Image (tube, rainbow, N blue to C red):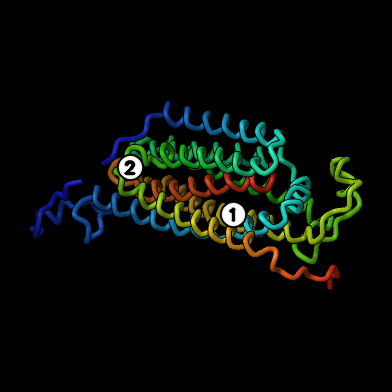
Amino acid sequence: MTPEGGGGATPDELAVRPPRLAAHFASMGVQLDASRLGIWLFLASEVLFFGGLLCAYAVYRANHPDLFRYGHFFLDWRLGALNTAVLIGSSLSAAWSVRCAQLGRRGGLVVTLLVTLALASVFMAVKYAEYSHKLHHGVSWGAAYHPSTEILAALPAALRWAPPPPYVGTFFSLYFLLTGLHGIHVIVGMGLYGWLLRRAVRGDFGPGYYVPVDVVALYWHLVDIIWMFLFPLLYLV
Amino acid sequence: MPHPVRASVLVRTAATLLALTALTVAASRLDLGRFSVLLALAIAALKASIVALFFMHLRYEGRFRAVVLVVAVAFAALFAGVVVFDTTQYQPGIVKPRDTLP
């Protein structure tokens, strides 16, 4: 991206600077580049954040694999798969919203932002249903793990006859920690998309300026990626 | 300003991701013992790369920005890998806790 505008800015050049261009950037292209690098650095820190949590998962799994084989039967993989599909759909609409902003299609932009927000709400609704079902049956974290007879009866037959491994609460500590923190990230993303929606309806975005749409979409894709790891590690294996 | 990603690319990427999700579920049904986790992680890493390359348009940008993500993932993997190696190495020396919960 070659900067336009050169060294010093004459009054004429200042007058034609786009209103959204910050003073320390030479052009909109440079501003977009810098913003993208900035969000990637933040996403790198998020990768390390969840990497640390997954490290805790790895340590417990390496030392107590029976715990995870037992615990994952409490999780409904169909709801997990539904949530995965919902997030993939929301990633599609997020990427599409960036495309609409780049092409100046305001109607398309508003629709895709709405769809992303709606799918994120579906994800949180399914999450809420899962959590409330578990907590209602006493399946909680750590020492608070006291499963009800109904939920134990719902386990596969092969598991019911063998004695359960000790400290199953540890698996659920990891489950609630990982999915709960991911859920907080989804809620933050929903807030960001609500803000973007307000600005899009106001007509703030277009081919000349769409940095916030791009940046929030990148954050949202990372939230999707993290769930792609959480789903198989907790629900499937 | 960078060019917009084509709509057909976006839709095909989403379809590929959904297909890989179905593959993950199917693969988890196979009884591979310890390798189930590795296979699940491998498919998840493939899905993550597809999201990063196409949805996050890393494929169309310079190499430098991809380095940020690759380095972060590499360090996270190094972190988890060395810690797991460490903990499994010293398991025999750990005194087992008493089997009474408070």
- Residue that appears at 47% across and 27% down: B12
User: Residue A223: horizontal and vertical position, in percent?
Assistant: 53, 49
In the depicted structure, whether residue B35 falls above or below residue B89: above
**Residue density around tag 2, few if under 14, some if 14–19, many if 20 or more, within 10 Å:** some
Q: Which of marks 2 and 1 is in front?
A: 1
- Residue that appears at 42% across and 26% down: B8
Q: Can residue A8 be seen in this view?
A: yes
- Residue that appears at 53% across and 33% down: B17
| Numbered disc total | 2
Q: Is residue B1 shown left or right of residue A183? A: left
User: Residue B44: horizontal and vertical position, in percent?
Assistant: 55, 41
Q: Nearer the viewer, residue B51 or B73?
A: B73
Q: In which quarter of the image is residue B39?
A: top right
Amino acid type for the residue under numbered disc 1: His
User: Residue A231: horizontal and vertical position, in percent?
Assistant: 63, 44
Q: Nearer the viewer, residue B94 or A41?
A: B94
Q: Quadrant of residue A87?
A: top right
In the depicted structure, whether residue A146 falls above or below residue A219: below
Q: Mark 1 points at which residue?
A: A182
Q: What element carries label 1?
A: helix
Q: Furthest-front residue in view?
A: B92
User: Residue A24: horizontal and vertical position, in percent?
Assistant: 22, 61
In the depicted structure, whether residue A190 falls above or below residue B28: below
Amino acid type for the residue under numbered disc 2: Gly
Q: Is residue A23 shown left or right of residue B15? A: left
The answer to whether marks 2 and 1 sit on the same chain is yes
Q: Mark 2 points at which residue?
A: A206
Which of the chains bears the disc numbered 1?
A
In the depicted structure, whether residue B53 falls above or below residue A233: above
- Residue that appears at 61% across and 54% down: A183
**Residue density around tag 1, few if under 14, some if 14–19, many if 20 or more, within 10 Å:** some
